[in-house]
Image (spheres, helix red, strand yellow):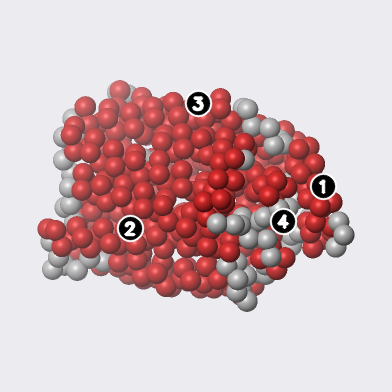
Amino acid sequence: MADRLEGKARLSKFEITAYAIPGIGAGYMSLLIGLFIMKFSTDVLLIAPAIMGTIFGVSRVWDAISDPIIGYWSDRTQSSLGRRRFWLLLSLLPLSLTFVMVFSPPMTLSGHALVAWMAVGVIGFYSAITLLIVPHLSLGAEMTQDYHERSRLYGSRHAAYTVGSIIALASMQVLINAEQESAEAVRETAFQLSVLAGIVSAVLVGLAVVVLRERKDYQERPPRAPLEAFKDVWANPHARLVVVVTFIENIGSAVIALLTLYVCQYVVGRPSLAPLIILTYMIPSSLSVPIWIPLSRRVGKIRLWMFSMMLTGLSFGGMFALPFLPTMEAKTTLIFILAFFAGLSAGCGGTIAPSVQGDIVDYDEMMSGERKEGSYFAAFNFVQKSATGVMILITGWVLQVVGFIPNVEQTMLVQISMVTLYGLSPLVCYTIGTVLFSRFSLDATEHERIRSAISERVGAP
């Protein structure tokens, strides 16, 4: 009876692997879109950065709106596959097709037609990946209610996501090499890679759908009307604090992926090193996961997440010094060092943050008697993507206004504008987020009290 009510205290390696593997495809697609599609559009397709910034901004704002809808619908889904795997299966085709679309505009398109193609592709991709990400995160919170086992589960998902990102770096290097040949070579290579990625991602998600199982008793406790569900999210004091902190963090971090290639090429002056610099970030992000899981047991998830926030801010804040260093070698050394520490903080945050968010859902169950993981993870994604959409829109227009011209040496004004967005913005925002999150009180002791209260109520005759 306790296992049915509380979920497994310890998940098998097979279950954790099956849950994690969709992250490989999601990590690959998200990173390649985030890092390369802006540069692909401005430098290969010759679309103005302000236009692409607007497309990205609109896509992320729309994506933020669609998240709550998908989250609520998945909470209320009744199917033989369960509440979450139904949506994972539904995501396969649109996700693969839109990913191919953004990297394969027809050669005959130009002007407004080309812009329209990219707008549909980018907005469609972010809509499709919502069908995967929100139910997948929600499923993780259902698989176990153990305070620390959640960190283990989400840490494995983060590691898989990072593996996909590392593979995306190899693909990006291939695309950068193709840039040295011709725009046509980039287009052909991008098309081939996107088709292969779409197929592999569909297979990995399909395997998770087949292998994983869901708790049927949760389908019996769906949320009420959508407005009521999201009112509960905002009324939850723990969720409200995390929502505010998440918004502030993402105001600062939204442009990091977007501007990495620009900083490497136009500030550091070593565009060929971009994949290696990003790899320096990715490797500690993935390999440090086994460190953060036991450390969270010792010092607590709250303190550890605060540490990751501050380390992230300091790591990227140091990037502001890049344009002022006297030599290319000094710039290269600094960005490699800072990328390593930023990767450590990403591994910590990627492991701990969704685990804490899962604990917040348990608090809601104690208060409402409902299980609405989808609504909660959708709300967290909503503020993240809203902030991202706003900052990407601002970034595109900032580059346009300060005089960015692709494929030429940039003025000092352009370089300082880039590192202000890339470095100072994360430092300020993550510092504010750390201070606010120090008020968070849902620790291991409080979570144990919550689970005991739920068990007594559900198990009562």
Category of crowding for the residue at label 4, using alpha-carbon neighbours closer than 10 angstroms: few (below 14), some (14–19), many (at least 20): many
Q: Which of the two residues, 356 or 368, is positioned nearer the viewer here? A: 368
Residue 273 sits in which quadrant? top left
| Residue in the picture at 17% in, 47% down | 48
Q: Which mark is residue 431?
A: 3
Q: Amino acid at mark 2?
A: Ile
Q: Reading the chain from its start, which is encountered first: label 1 or label 4? A: 4
Q: Reading the chain from its start, which is encountered first: label 1 or label 3? A: 3
Give coordinates of residue 324: x percent, y percent: 30, 23
Where does label 4 land, which residue?
144
Q: Amino acid at mark 1?
A: Ser
Q: Amino acid at mark 4?
A: Thr
Left/right of residue 6 with respect to residue 245 in the rendered view: right
Category of crowding for the residue at label 2, using alpha-carbon neighbours closer than 10 angstroms: few (below 14), some (14–19), many (at least 20): many
| Residue in the picture at 36% in, 70% down | 97
Describe the element under mark 1 as helix, strand or loop.
helix
Left/right of residue 317 with respect to residue 399 in the rendered view: right
Residue 8 sits in which quadrant? bottom right
Q: Reading the chain from its start, which is encountered first: label 4 or label 2? A: 2
Q: Which mark is residue 452?
A: 1
Where does label 2 land, which residue?
123
Give coordinates of residue 349: x percent, y percent: 57, 41
| Residue in the picture at 32% in, 24% down | 325
Describe the element under mark 2 as helix, strand or loop.
helix
On the question of residue 327 being in view, the answer is no
Structural distance between the alpha carbons of marks 4 and 2: 33 Å
Is the C-beta separation of discs 1 and 2 under 8 Å?
A: no
Task: Tell me: residue 206, above or below residue 313.
Answer: below
Is the C-beta separation of discs 1 and 3 under 8 Å?
A: no
